[in-house]
Image (spheres, rainbow, N blue to C red):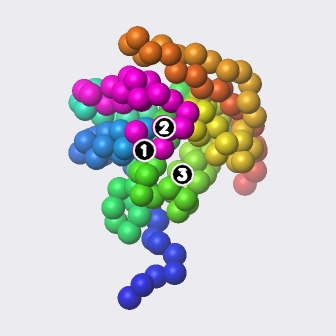
Amino acid sequence: MATAHPKLALRPFLPDDASQLAEIFRASVIDLTAEDYTEAQQQAWISAADDEAAFGKRLGNQLTLMASLEGSPAGFAALGPGGKIDMLYVHPAAVGQGVGAMLIDALEKLAGARGAEKLIVDASDTARGFFEKRGYIAQQRNSVTIGDEWLANTTLHKPLAKPEAP
């Protein structure tokens, strides 16, 4: 029986997820950023997942959530120290289905509950509009070097509402 709305679910990252999330990371960069970054820049970017054990360790050392759509991995987001969103990647087949919004909503709530006053993200040119629509405000442009390639991004901030006292 068909459903009107796909079933989205969240759960914490588990070490066994590293390989699947590395694949989502690669597919997202390659399929979604071609209008903003060259092929050489994309290849440099996805090199962060070449060592899947290190990639998994990076995710495991942060608050990382994995989203699934109808039971299949669809995206992930990682929150690092100081309220910094380290990663947000959605599989190209799941774009526009609420996966990114669900992940960021969850990180915002969790960060606020932990006392963070704001969230910070260094958003790619591709993701900048997504964050701006959610109330993030551009602070500065950045150039990041990965290998021999330079990639531009924008640092954005979003103040978080203070949790209400019980």
Tell which of 2 and 120 is nearer to you: 2
Which residues fall within the magenta stretch? 30-51
Q: Closer to us: mark 3 or mark 1?
A: 1
Query: Could you tell me the amino acid type at mark 3?
Result: Gly
Q: Which mark is residue 100?
A: 3
Q: Closer to us: mark 3 or mark 2?
A: 2
Q: Quadrant of the C terminus?
A: bottom right
Q: In terms of secondary structure, where does tag 2 sit?
A: loop
Q: Which mark is residue 55?
A: none
Query: Could you tell me the amino acid type at mark 2?
Result: Ala
Which is more N-terminal, label 2 or label 3? 2
Instruction: Look at 64% across and 37% down and name the residue there.
Output: 128
Write down the residue under mark 1: 31
Q: Main secondary structure of the magenta part?
A: helix
Write down the residue under mark 2: 34
Q: Could one spot residue 41 in this view of the protein?
A: yes
Query: Could you tell me the amino acid type at mark 1?
Result: Asp
